[in-house]
Image (cartoon, grey):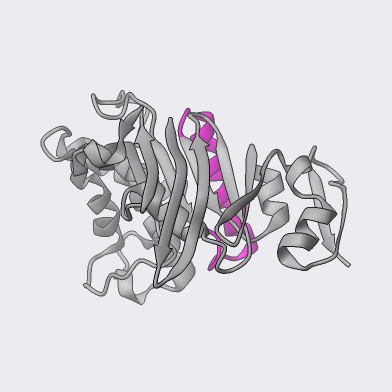
Amino acid sequence: MLAAVDIDLALGGSQILDSVTLDLRPGEFVAVLGPNGAGKSTLLSVLSGTREPDTGNVTLDDRPLTSWQPQALARRRAVLPQFSELDFSFRVFEVVQLGRTPHAGRSSRQRDLEIAFAALEATEAVHLADRIYPTLSGGEKQRVQLARILAQLDLPAPAEYPPDRATDRIRYLLLDEPVASLDPAHQHATLGIARNAARQGAGVLAILHDFNLAAMYADRLVLMNRGQVAAIGDAASVLTPALIDAVFNLPVQVMAHPQLDCPYIVPV
């Protein structure tokens, strides 16, 4: 389990995270919602190990995150940031292969190639394989970066390749606004990939802004406001008119989804 307990973090004299406690369990998809400036991306950076909290603890498998060697940690968790800066004239397939770097000395070149191709297939980006990365649109770049982190964690690994020593343990995907630059079809495709990774036993955390996408795909929702966790639970308990109005100052009507067993949110 990936867990954060009583996390406090101040930046520039402002309290960004205030006594935040959250765990990410194997096999579940957690969506983090909240207004701009609520501390969502900062929380993800703390969970990923790229930023240390002022107080509190972050652990992976009951070990402090700071005790993990970088390569070992990279084989266990991967992070998709909001923006990925890469100006070199790499082909897309080469960018995806960068995800295999933590497996150097533990994986064959053939395995790396097969896994990179499988990741491009999963993100519907095979047709981009020979394109020069900086020439892609924002949405195409995001799909390629998603393929990169899937390859990093062997998600999905080709059937003929059993998990190696590093990947037969639970893995974690941390996604910071993964659908922000995508069209509706690719938004659902991306969250379907995340949902499938959870079905395969991975812990998945995604920062989202769309109430309905969160309700459709996530097992648990975390609602943040002003650096604190305002609510945590399933979609029905978190996406209530009272909570949404209190946190977002947005009146809504909550009704049953016409086809799925989840709430459907309509601003009013």
- Looking at the picture, does residue 132 appear above or below residue 65? below
Is 158 positioned to the left or the right of 107 in the image? right
The residue under the point 79% across, 67% down is: 250
Q: Please state the horizontal and vertical placement of residue 14, each as a whole percent of the image.
A: 46, 69
Magenta stretch, overall SS = helix
13 lies left or right of 23: left
Position in image of residue 86 (x %, y %): 28, 70
Q: Residue at x 83, y 42 (%)?
A: 259
Residue 217 left/right relative to 98: right
Q: Quadrant of the C terminus?
A: bottom right
Q: Quick one: quadrant of the N terminus?
A: top left
Tell which residue pokes out farthest to the left in this image.
105
Could you say which quadrant of the image residue 56 lies in? top left
**Is residue 183 one of those drawn in magenta?**
yes
Q: Residue 70 in the image: x percent, y percent?
A: 20, 44
Residue 143, position in %: x, y? Answer: 44, 58
**114 or 214, nearer to the observer:** 214
Q: Can residue 126 be seen here? A: no
Residue at the (44%, 59%) spot, across then down: 42
Residue 199 in sight from this viewpoint:
yes
Q: Which residues are magenta?
A: 177-202
Residue 57, placed above or below residue 225:
above
Residue 239 drawn in magenta: no
Q: Residue at image x 47%, y 35%? A: 203
Closest to the observer, 148 or 223:
223
Give the mark count. Answer: 0
